[in-house]
Image (cartoon, rainbow, N blue to C red):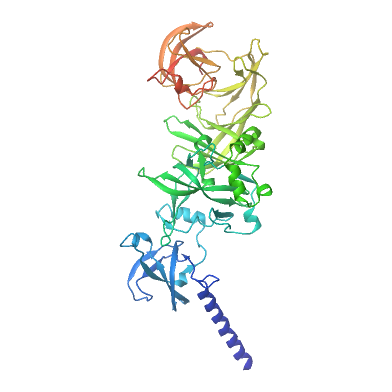
Amino acid sequence: MKKVKSLICGFLLLAASFSFAATNDYYKEDGSILEGMYVNSKEGLKIRSAPDLKSERISGLIHGSYVLLREIGKETVIDGITAPWVKIALPQAEWKDYEVEECGWVFGGYLQKTNPLSYKELLELSKTVKYIDLPFFPDEEGMNYKENYSDTWQKEDKDSLYYNSCLENFCNYENPRLEGYVIADCLGFCPAVAASICGCVFYLKAGTFVELEYVVGYGIAGKETESGGLLYPVYEGTYLDDDGCRCLCYIRGIDFVSKDDISTVHDEKGNELHLYVQRALKDINYNTYGLSMDAVSRDLNLNETYESANIAQSDGYRVNQIRYVDAEGNSKKVKIDSSEINFTLAYPLNFKKPLPFIIEKKISEGYKIKIYSLKVDESVIKTFPVCEYEYSFYDERSGIRDYYYFTPKGIVVCHVTGKDGETVEVGSYYFYGQKKSAPYLFEEGQYYSGAPEGNKKVKKVGQFCNPICLLPMHQSPDSGSLTLCLLNPGTLLKIEEVGEKTVIDGLVSCWVKVSPVNDDYSSEGDLIQNVFPAESTSAWVFGAWLE
């Protein structure tokens, strides 16, 4: 009997300790009330005018949202849960006077210290709920944050603080690059403007235009994330909402890509396709800087940090992520097994079966080109190596070097021969044919001696084409007229007008008036659109050298 009594007493003491612990959940170690807590109720949580189930329901809170605590009331039992009533600040949208705080009561049994929703769940929720009250960016597995005015990180364990590289500070003092876009669907954060107001997160769609202003903190994507240990700035900036209004927001550096790191082309309907490339500085790492964000901030504001990384190329940078954005604005991650950092997008509309390509360029220790075709599925982008080559020769006088261009059936890679100051010409080329069964797959390269020949194919208005060699662009359909620029092989063009036939270098073809499809550059390094006469968007080339 004594044993039974002791067991009952022990159970009562344990229950009492649980009840006491639950009450303590609303207080800090110093005895003061917590600033806020998260709602853990999938059905939502009712806000009442008084701490009583019979009192008026004045509003409600959604699952996963954050509330500011004002007072801890008496304990009660609801739904079998023992917990106190808690007085909270109503969301500002519920206030009658926008500057006067209003409060209500909720049952504390459905409040907890951590958010029950993951980052992905909150991102999905934000597509239907415009604003979700939160104190900062939500806790995400492997993510850690530090605000500028704080000396501490949210998580203090070693794995959460390790980083092997760092994203650029695009607000750096010496060479700011403030304009860019959201790299993938993410959460933006709107900070609180007063102590009585909670911040909130909201949905930012991939491709949303953002203009940065300054750095407000830092984040670390830990070892276990896809970024594999990455330090990044958190910015304050503005974005354009659906109504075209400029709105304040915080955005994480991992969710932003600078305009300078975007390659854009157009599809057959004129829609834009993008390739976003996000690069990280290798020299800014935990082993060198530790947790000294003052030192990190100092060096991220120096132009020489980026100059030395640009000189080192793949030894100075690593690619954190590459994303392909389709015509509907869907952002999809691209995985390429490469240590290089320079990638551009191509979409040759003169193909019988057009598809996107990624062009990888290595410009240190020689000049190498590698071309990948892309298979675009609903959620995944698969890459397939088509061909690669290294410049065997480059003539600085003429600008001629090994090059590639597209035909309706495949890709041609031309190799030049010669010596500086002597005649330079194409000595051989390879043709990589597109497979009929799978357009993203290509045959092994077929070798041909000599140079590709000009053609007599009939050119039609509206056709897409590209030069098969360095091609002069003239102001009028006459080889004696002003040369506006030299078009690089592979530059995608659209035929706007077909002129008269003529004979040049023994080839019979028409002069054709063409316009560039994309923002491509001439051999001289000028944006092609900028070389045209005033109010003109096209000029003339000899059609025999178009494919």
Percent x, y for residue 231?
A: 60, 48
Q: Quadrant of residue 298 in the image?
A: top right
Percent x, y for residue 96?
A: 30, 62
Q: Quadrant of residue 281 in the image?
A: top right
Q: Nearer the viewer, residue 463 or 305?
A: 305
Q: Nearer the viewer, residue 150 or 94?
A: 150
437 horizontally vs 285: left or right: left
Query: How many numbered circles are shown?
Result: 0
Work out which residue is located at the far bottom of the displayed protein and give it.
Answer: 1
Residue 542: in sight, yes or no? no
- Please identify the quadrant where the N terminus is shown: bottom right
Percent x, y for residue 297?
A: 58, 46
Residue 17: in sight, yes or no? yes
Q: Is residue 404 above or below residue 382?
A: above
120 horizontally vs 415: left or right: left
Percent x, y for residue 342?
A: 59, 33
265 horizontally vs 318: left or right: left
